[in-house]
Amino acid sequence: LCDRIAIMDGGRVIACDTPIGLIRSLNLEAVVSATVLSSSTPLTEQTLGAIAGVSEVSISGQNGNTQLKLHTSDAQASIVGLLSLANETGTTLGDLASTRANLENVFLSLTGRSYLQTDEPAAEAPPEPKRRRRGRSAT
């Protein structure tokens, strides 16, 4: 829809390029995600970070529902490595998915925070005070 995009943070333009150029600037091809259903040996950021292509690891979750996110420059090698590691550690994975990098990843990488969009309408401006019209008298 557009040829160039500017990303602003704090009133300053911090990046400006084509959508593809901004995405390529991340050196990030994809994010591989999975849910740990069961594991005899916990997976750590260090062991996951050693998987081919992985540049960043995120482990989150609670109540036995652990989510893994691997930022990678080689999705295929990272998926193969994750499955191999899961096999070695007796880990059962679910919801294995790979998503390509997008402009939201670029924004998050450059600003360090995610874009929050609310479904609430913007606050309306208060109504202007009504002015009395002075009319001409017909006398």
Image (cartoon, grey):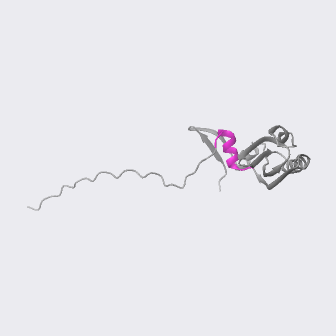
Residue 56, x across and y down, in percent: 78, 40
Residue sitting at x 17%, y 58%: 135
**Which percent across, then down, holds residue 73?**
82, 45
Q: Is residue 106 magenta?
A: yes
Pick the residue in front: 3 or 86: 86
Q: Which residue is drawn at 83% across and 42% down?
A: 48
Please give left or right for residue 105 compared with residue 93 in the image.
Answer: left
Residue at the spot x=54%, y=55% of the render?
119
Compare residues 111 and 49 and report the one nearer the observer.
49
Verify whether residue 99 appears in magenta: no
Left or right, residue 81 beside residue 128: right
Which residue sits furthest left?
Answer: 139
Query: Image quadrant for the N terminus?
Result: bottom right
Q: Which span is picked out in magenta?
A: 101-113
Residue 126 location, x and y as percent? 37, 50
Q: Which of 88 and 125 is in front in this view?
A: 88
Q: Which residue lies furthest to the bottom in this view?
A: 138
Image location (x, y in percent) of residue 41: 85, 44
Relative vertical location of residue 41 with respect to residue 93 in this rendering, above or below = above
**For the image shown, how many numbered marks are present on the structure?**
0
Closer to the camera in the image, 57 or 41: 41
Q: In which quarter of the image is residue 58?
A: top right
Q: Which residue is drawn at 25% across and 53% down?
A: 131
> Could you tell me what secondary structure mostly forms the magenta stretch?
helix
Image quadrant holding the C terminus, namely bottom left
